[in-house]
Amino acid sequence: MKLFFAILACFSLGLLAKEQLAVQPQTAPKRIAISFDDAPTPSSGYFSGEERTSLLLESLAKAGIQQTAFFAVSQHITPKGHQRLLAYSKAGHIIANHTHSHPDLNSTSLADFIAGIEQADSALQQYPTFRRWFRFPYLREGDTLEKRDGVRQYLAENHYINAYITLNNYDWYLNQLFQQAIQAGEAVELAAMRNFYVDTLMASIHYYHELALQYLNRSPQHVLLLHENDLAALFIGDLIAELRLQGWEIIPMEQAYQDPLLSYQSSRLFTFNPGRIGEIAADQGQRKGLWHSTLNEAYLKARFSSEVLQR
Ligand SMILES: [Zn+2]
């Protein structure tokens, strides 16, 4: 008899979960916060660093975005770099830690890596909106248990959060393709570049959101990973407009990290990390599709060539 009720209970729970899954995609709020890594990135060709910062701030203000976060690499705090971080901070955006020199933890010792976090911490405290949020360069959290647990312990003891992302993409590679084409003197049609940028980013956002609904059974407060690059300065307004058109609400970064996802810690060791939704999917047994097809250089290069360079 007990077994019968146990089976009945499982059956109804199963039904309930399925109903929620079926209803949720239409009714659940879609919330997203925006973060930019590698600030202040030096001039890369199209814009100077100062031009990029002014345009990015202007576009964010025009779109009514009150708080994003800039994850800073402190070796770029030159006098000009400092002015740019200060401008982001004064506009209300969070300034946070992305190490001093952007090392790859997979090829760096634990001690050197932590020294880089500490060096950035000292350099970044001067900014009014500095928060002890740490974003791992390349999202790599350690290829050995010693490194992974060593950094986890360091962050916890120093009141840092692991500033995870949920929405992964290759915006850095799109920017690389763009800059290479400009340097090679190719005619880059900006409208085509904008469509390509918005389209590939929206595809990855949609993909990881669906994965989140599948594995969490709820709609989390997402964190979008972008980089402080020229494409972001050119097209962030277009991306935000498209997000809103597709029903997304843009939320402040501080709100995003109030999500229970903050305390999630995988017990697995990820040499390469797809972001928190990918981690959770992997923890629940998914092996393929942790990186969406828009996170593939060959795929993006072929599309860039046909859609932007129109070859
Ligand atoms: Zn980075």
Image: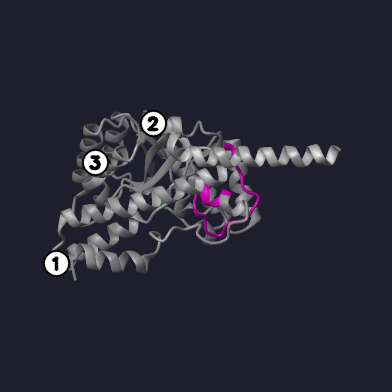
Q: Which residue is mark 3?
A: 237
Q: Nearer the viewer, residue 311 or 97?
A: 311
Q: How is the image coloured?
A: one colour
Which residue: 52% across, 33% down? 259
Q: Which residue is mark 1?
A: 185
Q: Secondary structure at mark 2?
A: loop
Stretch in magenta: 263-280
Instruction: Estimate the spatial distance between the alpha carbons at disc 3 and disc 2, rounded to whole Å.
Output: 16 Å
Instruction: Give the mark, 2 or 1, whose residue is nearer the N terminus.
Output: 1
Which residue: 65% across, 50% down? 267
Which residue: 56% across, 46% down? 215
Q: Which residue is mark 2?
A: 252
Instruction: Estimate the spatial distance between the alpha carbons at disc 2 and disc 1, rounded to whole Å.
Output: 39 Å
Residue 187 location (% of width, % of height) = 13, 64
Instruction: Estimate the spatial distance between the alpha carbons at disc 1 and disc 3, rounded to whole Å.
Output: 26 Å
Question: Which label number is shown at residue 30?
Answer: none
Instruction: Give the mark, 1 or 3, whose residue is nearer the N terminus.
Output: 1
